[in-house]
Amino acid sequence: MATSTNFSLLKGLGILNLFSDSRPEITAATVVSELGMNVATAHRFLMSLEEAGALNRLNRGTYVLGHRISELGLLAGKSNPILAIVQPVLDRLSLDLGESVSAARLLRAGITCIATAVSVQDISIHTRVGRIYEAAGTAHGQIWLAHMTDDERRAYLADLSPAGSQAKGRPNPLPDSQEFERIRNDGFCVNSGGQQEEIGGVAVPVIDAQGKIVLTLAAYCFVSRLTDEMIDRSVEKLSQAAQTISLAVSTGATGAK
């Protein structure tokens, strides 16, 4: 029998996902606005997270990330060697392309950002670690869906939790099987204004030595900058980065030096 999902836990994690480089502090009003909770529920979750050490409350009613989150972040970096491989590759990739890039993994909650590098351009788009990508409306999501069988895709979408299926943008129709096959054969996906009209992205899979997808890499920018030249260059650079990560992961998995 399948284990039931703990939606209270997912709501708590959803609050933590509200934090980013551009928003280091949140309030109860932020939680109400972004996650659709009522005021009493938002306050209850914030107080619980504060008691657990995940948040610290400031005098003016705002919350910042707590000491326990910092400790867990350091532990995650030490215990998850793939992050040490991925982050330098993303940093170089962002400089090469001049756009923001990210890496994502498929988790039960959804397609989740695990690392990111922000463009140095004055006006750019960036995401945050822990963000859950909408499956049908993002380049990351469509790559993952394309590498599933029809049955796996239906089961995954049916089992997707509310936290993993939430999307702030417009609803997105699911591509048909032929489109997913094309994405899989081409080895990349272009999404232009799928989830949000002004944002486009290009994504590729990272395939391990066993032929399984382990990560997706994506570059994203404003649609006005997503020209054919930008797409071609992104596919080339993303594919090279994916090969670098795949080789490093495979070498590490075999214990080779």
Image (cartoon, rainbow, N blue to C red):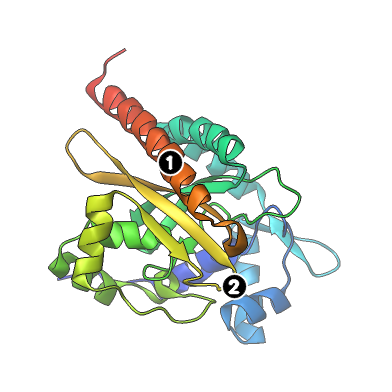
Q: Which mark is residue 238?
A: 1
Of tags 1 and 2, which is closer to the observer? 1
Q: Residue 225 location in percent, x, y?
A: 60, 56
Q: How many residues crowd mark 1 within 10 Å: few (<14), some (14–19), many (20+)?
A: many
Q: Residue 78 location in percent, x, y?
A: 48, 31
Which residue appears at 65% of the width and 69% of the height? Answer: 47
Say whether residue 105 is left or right of residue 207.
right
Q: Amino acid at mark 1?
A: Leu
The front one of 2 and 246 is: 246
Chain-order first, disc 1 or disc 2? 2
Q: Are marks 1 and 2 in contact (CB under 8 Å)?
A: no
Task: Give me the C-alpha separation between circle 1 and circle 2.
Answer: 39 Å
Compared to residue 118, the image places residue 59 above or below, namely below
Which residue appears at 60% of the width and 47% of the height? Answer: 99
Q: Amino acid at mark 2?
A: Phe
Which residue appears at 19% of the width and 68% of the height? Answer: 178
Write down the quadrant of residue 141 in the picture: bottom left
Residue under pointer 2: 45
The front one of 252 and 43 is: 252
Say whether residue 60 is left or right of residue 141.
right
Secondary structure of the residue carrying tag 1 is helix
Secondary structure of the residue carrying tag 2 is helix
Quadrant containing the N terminus is: bottom left
Q: How many residues crowd mark 2 within 10 Å: few (<14), some (14–19), many (20+)?
A: some
Which residue appears at 63% of the width and 56% of the height? Answer: 125
